Amino acid sequence: MNSLLRRYTIPLNAADRIFRLFKAPPRMPFAPYFKRKASQKFLKVIEGEIAETFLEVLLFFMKVKFMLDPSYRRNIENFKGCYQFKSKDGEVSVFVEFDSGKMDIKETLADEVDVTCIFKDGRSLINLLLSRDRDILRGLLNNEIMLTGNLNYMYKFGFMANHLQLELTGNLPI
Amino acid sequence: MDKNSITIQDLSLQEITLERLPRLKKLRDLHFDTKPEICLELPRLMTYYMKNLDPPASPERERWRAGNKEDSPELRSGKLNKYILENKRPVIIDGNLLAGTTTTKQIGVILYPHLLGQSIWPELETVSRRKKNPFGITIEEIDELNFEIFPYWMNRTIQEVARKENGNPPCQKLMERIVFFIATKAYCISHTVPDYAAVVERGLLDIINEAKEKELSLGNSSNDKEKRDFYQAAQLSLNGILSYAANLSRLAASMAQEENNPVRKEELLRMSEVCSKVPAQKPATFREAVNAVWICRIALLQENSSIAMSPGRLDQVLYPLYRRDMEQGMSLSEAVELVGCLWLKICDQAPLAPEVSEELFGGSGCNQAITLGGIDMEGKDAVNDLTYVMLRATELLKVRDPNINARYHPEINKKEYLERLCDVNINTGATPCFHNDISAIEALQGQGVTLEHARDYSSVGCVEITSSGRTFAHTGCILMNLPSALELAFFQGKHRLTEDEQIGPVTKSPEDMDSFEEFREVLATQLAWLIDQAVTLNNNFGKAYQKIHPSPMQSAIMEGCMEKGKDVIQGGALYNSSGAAMIGIAEVVDSMTAIEEFVFKKKLISFSELLEAINKNWENYEKLQAMVKTSTEKFGTDSEMAKKNADWLIAFLHNTFQSKENYRGGKYTVGYWTMTNHAGFGALSGALPSGRVKGEPFPSGITPVSGAAPELTPCLNFVANLDHTNIADGHALNLKYTPSTTTVPKFADTVEAFFKMGGLQVQFNIIDRKTLEDARKYPERYPDLFVRVSGYSAYFKDLSPHMQQEIITRAEYHLDTGREVPY
């Protein structure tokens, strides 16, 4: 799952550490590149071309946005929350931790999380999280998504994911 | 002269029209032209208070703890109520004669942050543009919710506190699969009728003084400490209401000063005067009484969710002052106008629903039931002039809330009253619904309610019956998908939607069953297990309320709490119960009957073959499906077999629920009403042995499956002969009549005959399929078309597609022939 994350998160994590050390956004020489790359990937996914990599792309884009966009970073500034995403077939296990403005992504199964989302495939996650072509009912009908734990954490995550989609497609409320 | 004698000559009050009441016409137009907006006032006030002023949570927490004992939950709630009401913005927003609004908007969507308010979080940036029931919200409000309000409540909602306290128990996980049951306390606990008679007969100051006296008479025991906290919390809450009323009075006075129109100026001055008196003091006029009820209602909706918080028997509560004012010269027109103003105020808010809820269960209003007519506590005819005034206001306005429930005692109430009820039903198409006093009173007595108190019953929410102002019942705390238990019985504790997961206990495989009784036993095992899960979760939620959100304001206006010194959530009310609504009963009975008839009696098919057919959604089994569907052994017919199965199921559910105790020491009662859940649960359910295909809506309430009961008389007989003492949480029998064949005398005769046979409740849509289909196609042409769903009314355009389909295909009868109209 994590080729994209592996490829791009090393410089991002380094920048993140600098940011934390100096308590100011780092000057990232490739920031526009990262942002463009992430946007393109995300758009492709939500347009249905590569739904199977949705989670990977979403988390990558989220991380980039948190790094580079202070207004988006505000979403997690005083927030602590742990999420487990698992595919039904057991192929994907991603642990996401938000802690005081920082987002960590690991390919692992964690012991304690606030909410767990078990999904059938990328399309079912898109149906759950994004507003365009949202079809939660189908997800329920086909047993494609199962959430356990504190649902408010998933609601918050849903807002952050949805915001990215609306921004990229020029559909944020004005 | 009899205290309730009818003086109105023309009971239909035909001369009073909307054209002659321009205020009501304008307000009604405004109601239909206004898009509801999410209101942040309550979550903003709650969050600010909890973050900064609630002692156990404030920055001064440690200092506070060192010097003081932590406040009890009751006291914390009392202080919160006072803060909210003192700081609630007084709003006089339109030409209504009543001051105050539930929210700060014309039609507001109240967001309760401690309940399921956060379910709208993912959709904040799209909710104003969604296709079905959009709600207005500004960018600033979105930011405030996203950054300030919602994060604070993430671990503090009833649902999450209950989860944490009980270690995310299996029953809660089960509910979150949605397909088995819903325990609604995470969303609301309001299904009840406050004691508005006390507000009108005493005024709040008198109640505050009673609480003060009781507080002062207490000693120092720990029990007394709890009581002291309760009495203090009640006083704080009621004083909050008085502050809010005073703010309204000041606002009306200042608006009057700036008003140039002399008529409106006079209205505002009068409004100011009224709010300076009530609800603090006992009202002296009809107008003051209506205002007192309205202001208390606004306040109660700040404490608890608006869903099904029902005003009760207002034609009884308000009648003495109505009569006094009529004797002093008030005209009938003025009375209808004032009642109409109250009706329009009651629908000044809409329930919050995220998109998936809209899709599954959408279109519901707040189900605020008002009960009219029937008999009084002494058993005498309670129908009065005000009953007819309220019926006329209902007929003129045709708004979905309040939900008008009419009581009728076939031996005591006059036939002309029943005929007027039918007339209003024909003219509005959907309201009121009809309750039989004889059966309802018996059902309540079966639950230990005294005869006098049972006679004083009101409907709550949809159709649930409770003794007015003295019962804390949360009549809709569990909504159970009955066919899901059937599935568990077919598949040894598994459900087709949740696939290989073992949900219920492993029971005998149908292939190994030798008799129908054996199958019934398995079904009973799965039902009992499911009931246990639902009850456990409801009790967990109830305990979470006890810990973080008692209701001292509600308790102060509820008989029993003052005497016991206990909050309603602790069992303070005179009567305590919890109500569970069963969804899909006709499908379950028809499925049981099909199994009995075709598998075990006639042996035309094996059980495994039948299960194979439903697993394939009847594909390649069309002949079998047709045989099952056209069987005459159906719920709502003369079938003895279906009747026996229905009786067994209803008795089993009643006995099993009654054996459980709720967290307040009360019993569980069972009802058969469904709101819009029969469409939602139907969408989530597979094909059934009844012949039903996957995803079809279940029939509503206790109504037969559409097409299964082609004759009206056997249908009414079937339901009337069910044991209503096992249906103490009420039922909704939904029927549809073709308008062209529906005349008042015939209509009234049918209702009367049904009641004389023992029927508990019945309700009608007087509308044909063609109109409904046209309304589905062109919703803009029918903005105010409202229909009876299952216990309450809704605007047809707001309903989910599943629900619209269910109403269109619902059995429609020609009243002159008594036969179902072919679809």
Image (cartoon, rainbow, N blue to C red):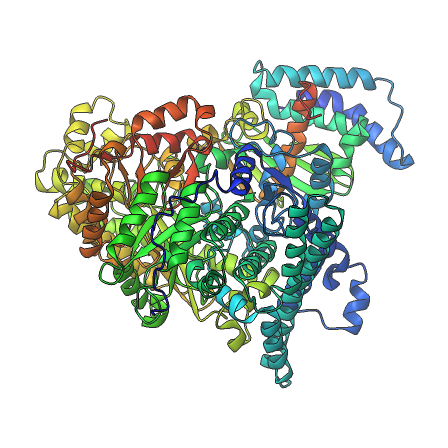
Where does the C terminus of chain B fall, quadrant-wise? top left
Q: Position of residue B537 (x, y in %)?
A: 47, 55
B346 to B125, vertically: above or below? below
Is residue A69 left or right of B331 when viewed as pictured? right
Q: Nearer the viewer, residue A69 or B221?
A: B221
Q: Position of residue B67 (x, y in %)?
A: 79, 73
Residue A26 sits in quarter: top right
Q: Position of residue B758 (x, y in %)?
A: 21, 56
Is residue B291 left or right of B684 when viewed as pictured? right
Residue B178 seen: no
Q: Position of residue A159 (x, y in %)?
A: 65, 33
Residue lying furthest right in this view? A22
Residue lying furthest front in this view? B329
B784 to B553, vertically: above or below? above
Where does the N terminus of chain B fall, quadrant-wise? bottom left
Q: Nearer the viewer, residue B58 or B96?
A: B96
Residue B401 seen: yes
B645 to B499, vertically: above or below? below
B621 to B295, vertically: above or below? above
Q: Which residue is located at x 66 percent, y 45 percent?
A: B104
* Total marks placed: 0
